[in-house]
Amino acid sequence: MEDLVIRDTDVVDGSGAPSYRADVVVDGGRIVSIVKEAAAAGCRRPRAARELDAEGLVLSPGFIDMHAHSDLALLRDPDHSAKAAQGVTLEVLGQDGLSYAPVDDRTLAEVRRAVTGWNGSGDDIDFDWRSVGEYLDRLDRGIAVNAAYLIPQGTVRALAVGWEDRGATPAELDHMRRLVAEGMAQGAVGLSSGLTYTPGMYAPDAELTELCRVVAEYGGYYCPHHRSYGAGALEAYAEMVALAREAGCPLHLAHATMNFGVNWGRAPELLSLLDEALAAGADITLDTYPYTPGSTTLAAMLPSWANEGGPAAALARLADDTTAERVRHHLETVGSDGCHGVPIEWDTIEISGVADPALTDFVGRTVQESADARGESPWTTARRLLVADRLGSTILQHVGHEENVRTIMRHPVHTGGSDGILQGTKPHPRAYGTFPHYLGHYVRELGVLSLEDCVAHLTSRPAARLRLPDRGLVREGYRADVVLFDPRTVAAGSTFENPRRLPTGIPHVLIDGRFVIENGRRTDELAGRAIRRSPQGL
């Protein structure tokens, strides 16, 4: 007798096809039988050791978060309800060019300091790995949801070149090629970049192209956080399209937004650029989160020259009055490359988290509000916080445009990605709410996408990008990574005021046929594992 039959569910199978009513049988971690209502008429219905009445619920493939920052959270927090409760069954880690493998002792310390705002200090983690393969092995000890990994180009550059703003020598470029090849051979799915973050932003296109050639040889893809989402955003997108085509490498555009006032209403121009490249044979996908504000670290706003040399060098510059005044001028007048070429507006920069608990009074306020309360300039407040918090502060940046968000999510190569930073007192609600927010707000309430189309965006399309041979669809023989949700009530519980509230309307989530969410509650199952790339797929 099989393990489980999910009875009388409405299957939205991830293909975009209309839903159908069926009994779905799971055994040994896979979907072994799908008996449609019409086919079951007059026949004996399937039985199993356990039966789940799913009347009124939709069964879909598990959601794939194409842009996650859970690199340490998966190790730190076995519960990980932030993602499991959303129906996420697979996350893609190693984003934005900075993560924790491959490293040596020096680079690991530098990266940990640079991305404290994203992932925490890591003081509670035993960093018993250095290579990509060793990190994936660590994940295999048991995690809440499945995880794939992108080789972080900034970390690779820090390891081979350092944090200086200069071109790589031929020997250093060869070293980076070897590191990328080793990481791909060990199971990474591709390469990420953070081209507004140091040290990855110091790489010229020719260097990135060479690394992408290596990725393409292994069947991976390139996932850049490109050089601007503000002034010059379209040019930055075009740069990545041209670079990937030159390298012969598939391209996945990370959190593909058009932000700041200079880009309001310009999403159709981006999509036209992509459609032209797609028509010419380019292999392109993208991901977005369904919210307008962005989220990153306060230190990321600084001009690249201020961050050259790494976190310690940046703090030394901020401590020097003359240099700090140059930083202010670039931020407020010129338009820092860290702020996407747009002069910073301090009333859009909300502090969402701090590394030092003594600084929590700043959280939930914009820099402008804190400055007004202190009777000082916004830059004085920002500088004070950057130094006191050792660059560990995270922010929400309220610069998005709703019509751009809706326009981009309708595109046929669009996928879902939370870009969820789980650190901070008031993190962005996308970390806890992206996938139910798509289903509840943009499907049920606004009708921007049909239910079947939206599920395809969140399941089969990312699975195709990742070359998953047996995930992303409800099919016989496929992995039983599935979600059961109520289309009438599914919604993000998280808000900007209460960002850690869990979603509603998602009572059951299974990974490998095991309940990780059951009757709306997290079980103790650690059903997730590292999902490795192989020549035949993942």
Image (cartoon, rainbow, N blue to C red):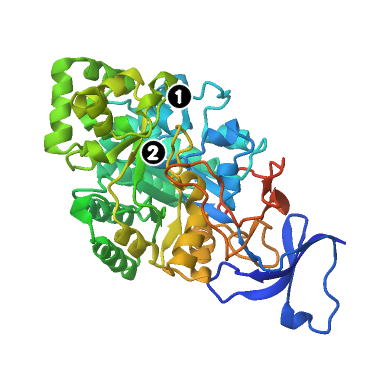
Q: Nearer the viewer, residue 40 or 350?
A: 350
Q: Earlier in the sequence, mark 1 or mark 2?
A: 2
Mark 2, residues whose alpha carbon is within 10 Å: few (<14), some, or many (≥20)? Answer: many
The correct choice, above or below, for 438 with respect to 155 in the image is below
Q: Position of residue 493 (x, y in %)?
A: 52, 49
**Label 1's element?**
helix
Tag 1: amino acid: Leu
Q: Choose between 129 and 365: the one closer to the eye.
A: 365
Q: Can you tell which mark lies on residue 108?
A: 1
Q: Could you tell me which quadrant the N terminus lies in?
A: bottom right
Left/right placement of residue 316 relative to residue 463 reads left
Q: Residue at x 38, y 66 (%)?
A: 411
- Is 417 situated left or right of 259 in this image? right
Q: CA distance from mark 1 to mark 2?
A: 14 Å
Residue 3 position, x and y percent, is: 82, 58
Q: Residue 346, can we see it?
A: yes
The spot of residue 395 in percent (x, y) is 35, 36
Which residue is labeled 2 in the image?
A: 97
